[in-house]
Each structure stands twice: as C-alpha cells, then as structure tokens.
Image (cartoon, rainbow, N blue to C red):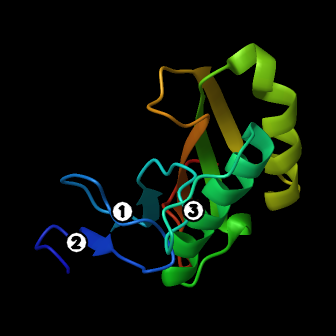
Amino acid sequence: MSEPNGKQAVHTDGAPRPAGAYSQGVVAGGFLFTAGFGPQDPVTGAVPEGVGAQTAQVLRNVGAVLAARGLSPRDVVKVTAHLQHLRRDFAAYDAAYREFFEEPHPVRTTVGSDLMDILVEIDVVALLPGPGPDLPG
C-alpha cells in the first residue's frame, strides 16, 4: 500500500506476522527499512534453541522481507541487533551473522537488550536499486 508521501508497506508470508501495529518493512526514500525480527518460524511459530540457531532464523526472516522487494543481503547497508546476553552470546551470534552477510559487510550496531523469551532481534536498512542521492564528492 503506497502513501501520498511515497512510503510503501512491505508484507510477505515468509516472515512472522506483525504482533502489533507495525509493518514487516517500509520502503521510503530509496531504502527498505525492516521491522525488528525475532527467531520465530513464520509457519510454525517455533523458536530454535541457542543464539546461533536463533540468529540464523532471524536472518531468514529478514531475508524474506528483502526478497519481497527483490533485494538480497548484499543490498543491506545497516544492521541493528539486540542480544539478550551480549557478552555470553556475541561469538555465536557473529558466526551465524557471517554466514548471511558477505564482504563488504553492512555497518552494524549490536547492543544488549532485555528481550521477551528470545535471545536475538535484528532489523536492517537496505538500499533499493536505482539512482542514489546526489552527494557532494
């Protein structure tokens, strides 16, 4: 659904349905912004055990929203990740993350957060194809 300001919601059955008043993704200003996704399987609702498996599922969920707009992980420019146990789980999270994103990696912020019954949540910003903004050189 496109708004007069050019904002367009993105929906896919390949990612968990929103649990509140938000979109899975929004296209605006030449970018796709995703919601923060947890590790729920979009079909069964199951949550895998361990931060590595949860990170992999979160990134599959994010990937489904990217794919709904014809994008891939290579189009991602910014990642924000929340870990329930930042120090304990960072290495396993980072290993799963490296399986999803290739060089050049997007910029990333990873913080510790109080999450509800999950170990990781991730949202991303991806660049849409087409002419970019005119930036001073």
User: The residue under label 1 is which amino acid type?
Assistant: Gly
Give the mark nearest the N terminus, 3 or 2.
Answer: 2
Q: Which residue does the numbered mark 3 point to in the structure image?
A: 62
Report the residue at 44% width, 57% height from top: 34
Quadrant for the N terminus, please.
bottom left
For the residues marked 3 and 2, what is the alpha-carbon distance in whole angstroms?
A: 22 Å
- Residue nearest the observer in this picture, 63 or 58: 58
Label 1 near label 2: C-beta < 8 Å? yes
Residue 6's tag is 2
State the SS at label 3.
helix
Badge 2 density bin: few <14, some 14–19, many ≥20, Cα 10 Å: few
Q: Is residue 100 left or right of residue 9?
A: right
Report the residue at 44% width, 65% height from top: 16
Q: Which residue does the numbered mark 1 point to in the structure image?
A: 29
Badge 1 density bin: few <14, some 14–19, many ≥20, Cα 10 Å: few
Report the residue at 71% width, 45% height from top: 49
Q: Is residue 65 left or right of residue 99?
A: left
User: The residue under label 2 is which amino acid type?
Assistant: Gly
